[in-house]
């Protein structure tokens, strides 16, 4: 599995979690103090994520770290 595919899977999982919380990209961006375009790039797998980014997402989405990686095929 290549890194790009993993980023896309994680991004898709983040999008699913965001939608399950009935949040828009704007809502999530505001909670994380980001631009909504950054959220869009994360969800599409078009930007690399740091662990700090993922932790911030977990706090904003009120999910556990393992929830972000659930179902991701490494």
Image (spheres, rainbow, N blue to C red):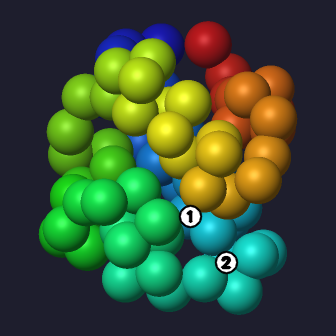
CB-based contact (under 8 Å), mark 1 and mark 2? yes
Q: Is residue 4 above or below residue 23?
A: above
Residue at 42 percent across and 42 percent down: it is: 8
Q: Residues within 10 Å of mark 1 (few under 14, many from 20)?
A: many
Residue 9 shows up from this direction = no
Between 14 and 21, the residue placed more toward the observer is 21
Tell me where residue 17 appears, x and y as whole percent.
71, 61
The residue under label 1 is 15
Which part of the image, by quadrant, shows the C terminus? top right
> Image check: 12 left or right of 29?
right
> Image check: 14 left or right of 35?
right
Q: Residues within 10 Å of mark 2 (few under 14, many from 20)?
A: few
Residue at 37 percent across and 83 percent down: it is: 26
Residue at 37 percent across and 72 percent down: it is: 30
Q: Secondary structure at mark 2?
A: helix
Q: Is residue 50 above or below residue 15?
A: above
> Image check: 32 left or right of 21?
left
The residue under label 2 is 19
Q: How many marks?
A: 2
Between 32 and 43, the residue placed more toward the observer is 32
């Amino acid at each position: 599995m290549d890194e790009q595919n993993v980023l896309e899977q994680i991004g898709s999982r983040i999008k699913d979690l965001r939608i399950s919380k009935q949040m828009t990209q704007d809502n999530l961006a505001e909670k994380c103090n980001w631009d909504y375009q950054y959220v869009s790039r994360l969800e599409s797998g078009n930007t690399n994520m740091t662990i700090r980014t993922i932790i911030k997402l977990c706090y904003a989405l009120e999910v556990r770290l393992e929830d972000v990686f659930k179902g991701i095929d490494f």
